Amino acid sequence: MSQYNQYAKKLDDAFKAARDEFSTAYNNLQSAKQDNDAAQAWQQETYKGENELRRQIAKADLLKAEQALRATETRVWADFDRQKARIRSDLEKAVHANSAANPDVVDANALELLKSGILTADDYFTLVDKYDNNPTMLRLIAKYAQESAADKNTDAKTRGALYMLADQCRNGKNRIMRSFDDLCRISDYCSGRAGGRYSSGHAASMADKWEQLSGTAVEGF
C-alpha cells in the first residue's frame, strides 16, 4: 500500500455508490417484469374487467420501471465518470508534488552505499523496495543503477535488469498513474461499458464482479 491508497479507495467508493443505485433500478425492473408476466394469467374476477385492469396496471408499472432504469443508468455512470476524472486529477497533482527532489528525505547512509560502487543488482532492487515511497531516493537509485549498468564489466543480463530498474524509478509518477488507469479500466469493464457495446443486463452481471477484479488492486495501491 502506498501513500496514494486513498485515491484508489475514493474510486472504489464512487463505483460502489453508482453500482448500488444502478442495481436498485435494474432490480426494480426485473420485479416489474415478473409482475407483468404474472398479470397475464387469468384469475377469478370479483368484478367484470378486473383481469384487464390488473394487466394495465402491471404494464404501466413496467413502463415506469423501464424509464427509471434508462434515466438512472445514464445519470449514475456519467456522474461516476466525472468523479473518476476528478479523483485522477487530484492524484496526478499529488504525485507531481511529491515527486519533486527533496534534500530532507535523502538517506545519507544509503547514498554512500550507492556511491561506493559495491552494490549488486539484487542490492539495487532491495533499495527500491525500501524507498518505494521516497521519490527523491528512487531518483538517486535510478542514477546509480544506470551508471552501474553502463559499466563495461556488467554482464548483459544484469545490465538489462538495471536499465529496467532505472527506467521504472525515474518514471515513478508514470507507474502510479498507470496503476490508477488500470483500475479505471476495471471500473469501465465492471460497469458494462468496455468494448463499446452496452446493455443493462450485461452491466448488472459485470457490476457484481467489481470486488473480485479490483479488490487486490485497491488494497495494494
Image: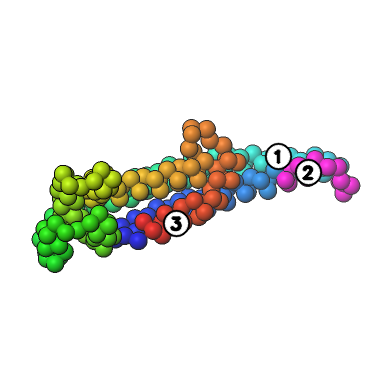
In this rendering, position of residue 67 left or right of residue 14: right
Give the residue displayed 58% in from the left and 40% down from the top. 202
The answer to the question of whether label 2 and label 1 lie on touching residues, with beta carbons closer than 8 A, is: yes
Q: How far from the left and from the top, in percent, is residue 66?
A: 61, 40
Report the magenta residues as a range.
34-47
Give the residue displayed 49% in from the left and 38% down from the top. 193
Q: Nearer the viewer, residue 177 or 27?
A: 177
In this rendering, position of residue 86 left or right of residue 183: left
Label 2 SS: helix
Q: Is residue 183 visible?
A: yes
Q: Which three-letter amino acid code belongs to the residue tagged 2?
A: Ala
Task: Residue at the far bottom: name it.
Answer: 109
Per the image, the residue denoted by label 1 is 59
Magenta stretch contains residue 39: yes
Per the image, the residue denoted by label 2 is 39
Q: CA distance from mark 1 to mark 3?
A: 44 Å
Per the image, the residue denoted by label 3 is 216
Q: Which three-letter amino acid code belongs to the residue tagged 1?
A: Lys
